[in-house]
Amino acid sequence: MSARDILDVLNVQRDELPGLPSKKRKKLNSDSPMPRQTGMARELYNLLGPNTPPVHLGGVSGGGGGLGGLKDKMNLKPSPWTRLEFNPQQGNDSKGIKLYHWVKGSRELLEQEQATKEYLFAKFNTGVEIPELVGEELYEQYMQEFEEKEEEEIVQARLEAEARRKKEEERRKERAKNEEKKQAKEQDKDQSKDEQDKDQSKDEQSKGEQINDKNIEVSIDDAGAGADADADAEVDTDTGAADNTGGIVTVASTWTYEETKYLWDLCKAFELKWPIIHDRYTYDLGRTQEDLKEQFYRLSAKALDSHDAQSKALIDGLELYSKSKETERKQYLENLLKRTPAEIAEEESLVIEARRFELAAKKMLIERSHLLTLLDSPQSSQSILQYNSSQGLATLYNNLMIMDKNQKKKQGQLQKVQNSNFDPVPPAIPVAASSSFKKERVFQTPLQQHLAGVLKSNQSNNIKLETNSIQQLLMKRLTQKEEEAYGLHYHSNEKLNPGVLLRSAQKLPGLQQRQSVLKSVSTLLQELDVPTGGGTSWKPVMPTRKTMAKYDELIRSVVALLEMKKGKDRLEAEIRLIKSQKGLE
Amino acid sequence: MATSGNNTAVYGGDEINAIVLDPGSYYSRVGYAGDDFPKLVIESAYGESKDGGKRFYGDRVGLARENYEVKPIIKDLMVTDWDAAVEQYRYCFEEYLQLQYDEQPILITEPVWTQHRYRQKLIETFYEEFDFPALYLARKPTCVSFQQGRANCLVVDIGHDSVSVTPVIDGISLLKNSMKTNYAGAFINDHIEDLISSQYPKLCTDSYYKIRSKTPTTYPEPAQCVYRALPNGGIGVTPLFDTYMKQHLWHEVKEALVEVPDSKLHGGSKNISNSIYNQDQYKRQFQFPAGQYVTFGIERFELADCIFDPVSYSFKNAKYTEKYPPSNGELTLKNTHEDYKPLKRARKAESNQSTPPPLDRLHITGIRGLTELVSSTLSNIDIDLRALTAHNIIVTGGGSLIPQLTDRLYNELSSINPGLKIRLHAVGNASERTNQAWIGGSVLLSLGTFHQMWVSKHEYEEAGPDRILTQRFR
């Protein structure tokens, strides 16, 4: 059975040319290089059909197994490798050298190829394009311009520095004043014990500060002198940097044309890799990398400007370079690296803490939004027009009733599911509601009634029913007053342990709280002088049924109160936070 | 076009089997580019008969002969004896490798502190003495960076004569920021000799070549050995040859015993560390050629500590003290530009760079140990590159093979520079680490793009050595 047979059975048409004679086809099949395979049943192999097998079955090309393939390879003439002479620097013949490497191919062919093609790696020999250095005359002119500009800058810088110094002095004075005030106020505080006075003085103080504090970036905190010291240090570094830049500006004007040419040469040779250019710059060892950059950039900008207007963006970029800014930036980086491990650790911990705060705030906001959506939840998207008429109202009422019923049903079912784990009997009809119950009651003795009730309650697994029936049984004999007098009580749905139980050892449901809550409850009770049987015990002195019930109630309400207070506190805090965020406070 | 069609595109290689010559202060290496190991590792020393007769190279040096001296060729990675150097290289090229000079160019590695005149002499010698068609000079740290494939790094080379720290940026060594001291392998050797001559007076330190057989003894006991019959009853052996052989002995002691302690042994918490390293578990025995066993405890650690803290270890023998003048590692770079102008302003060259960390002792003595050398180099590098280089510190050279050296270096650097993330790279293979610069040269020469950099003899003749040096090998 061949592939063709299967295709025939499956009624699959081959997409062959119908005109092709079958003989030829046969020939094609027999001539194909696959036929003799080993390690595979012939029938199975035939199933592969004319398609190429998906798996490579060794020695296909040789047609005689693996060995044949190897033999074939040995017979094959290997492609020649030639040790070829080449010149990597074809561009300039005078510098040319002869190097030798091995290349695949015959010598004649390769030599021909080499004559026409350039060296393979020649295209990687690239350089950067930098603008030509301007002529000497133009250079002098430009340098003149730069100098004038610099002088202006110096004047400005000086003015700024002076302004800064003045400001600083002002600030110092203010600080001194503030401190004096503070001291005075502290004395005041000591003298006056009234709280209102204190508040007032504080207000005054803050007001005074607000008035004094105009235009000062560094906020002066009345809490710590440490902050003041920090501010001092900052100011010092600022002025230092200003002095420094001023110094550099004054000396940088000594560029000669020759030195600039030397710089240009290096820039070309090292492809504008500034660290290296600076390293190999030996004309004047005092120059910094920023000096070199400045000179190169400003002259390049000028040169480009005079030549073509197309590279406007580039020129703008070049002119943006500011040596003072660059040195300042490096100074800052320097300071960053100089931090001690303790400082780094502190910074890290601060960052972590900040992140924690952020997270907490986010969490709170999310909770808030959840709450808000819950409060808003039954916001109907439908219009209320249809309920405006009395008819509409009636339907609405009906709908609501149905919904209510459904909900109750669902709850009932839920309860049933919980209760009926062992007893899948459907709930009995409520005793009072069923008409048959009444009849029974009429004809049965109380005991029978009781038994029937017990039976029914057992059937339905409803504890309430059971207790109700007992109550009903006893109600026949005793009045409410009598019950109380005898101290009779129906434990309706409380779980009772078998045996005798002292009420003083009773577990109150109100006490089932977390330890921390209980603690705060007990402190509150102590504050209110509620007797709790003394010390750690949680019972009233006389644990009668009524007192116990009241006591339980009390505890529950205290817990509820505490929770309310907590919630209130939180809300207030939030309100304050949001207000401060919005700048209301 | 190159070796094999498809691979070319991947690694950009073009093998021309050029020669790489890497002269070192202890060993020099010669081999073909494209190999992963030099064909010949030869001592940078030669033997010579006193009457100026035949010279010996390679393995033939260490044979005791009458009236025969052994002299060094290279000091501080620079050739000092040009005649011998040329002869040694000729021996390598012609006898050992049997080269056809005109078939391949040669690459020579050089340290960063070579001066213009020395380099001129170097290329003149090579162009004129040998018939290589082309030549190139490459800085050693550059080669090391190529071996590791890290274009930006800080190369810490702990060699025999010198310890050098060089930043490499974009594959080019920065000369101004480089530092070098002589507190390296030979310094430890001298300390070993100093220690033994002062503390073990009864120890017989005759080298192996004198001893024929021996019976093991423990140190205070005298050595029991039979001496070998030397030419002319041993009288003919010159003191120079004997010192050479002793150097080998100290070298062996160093390789067998020395270990770096966790922290400085002198100054600071001295007593604690001393008591730790005197414990039995840190003691090692060494058998000297005459059969005497000596046990070393804390000395093992002190010998290694001396390259970290050379100030605390002074020689008992004055001749060594003279040999190692206090060095802060800064290189004196001369202005190579023809038109030197005196500095117009008294401004520090690194006004934009931070001053090195305040090491009080450093200011007093001006001596920098290994860690201080590295960290002061780091602090002199341009701030934008500092983090990058600190993250790529390559430790190389035979001296770095002392156990625990990289750990100590890492710990100290990290504590001195808390703001920087320090990462050390050291090749695990010992023979690769000692020959790292050579291997790097081999890598460099296998790149197809490199071959346009060769400076041919023709070009040299046309332009002259001065121009070649300033234009091509800068």
Image: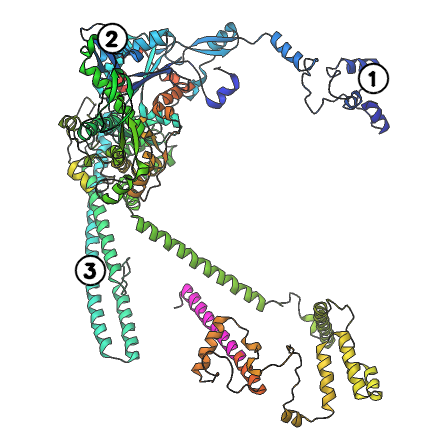
Q: Say which quarter of the image contains residue A77.
A: top right
Residue A390 at x, y = what percent? 72, 77
Whether residue B77 is visible, yes or no, is no
Badge 1 crowding class, 10 Å Cα cut-off, few under 14, some 14 to 19, many 20 or more, is: few
Q: Nearer the viewer, residue B348 or A359?
A: A359
Q: Chain of mark 2?
A: B
Q: Secondary structure at mark 2?
A: strand
Question: In the shown orientation, is residue B450 left or right of residue A425?
Answer: left
Disc 1 element: loop
Residue B233 at x, y percent in the picture: 20, 10
Q: Is residue B241 left or right of residue A566?
A: left
Q: Quadrant of residue A129?
A: top left
Magenta residues span A556-585
Measured in 3D between alpha carbons, the distance from the residue under mark 2 to the one under mark 3, in whole angstroms, is 82 Å
Residue type, numbered disc 3: Arg
Which residue in the structure is indicated by mark 3?
A: A172
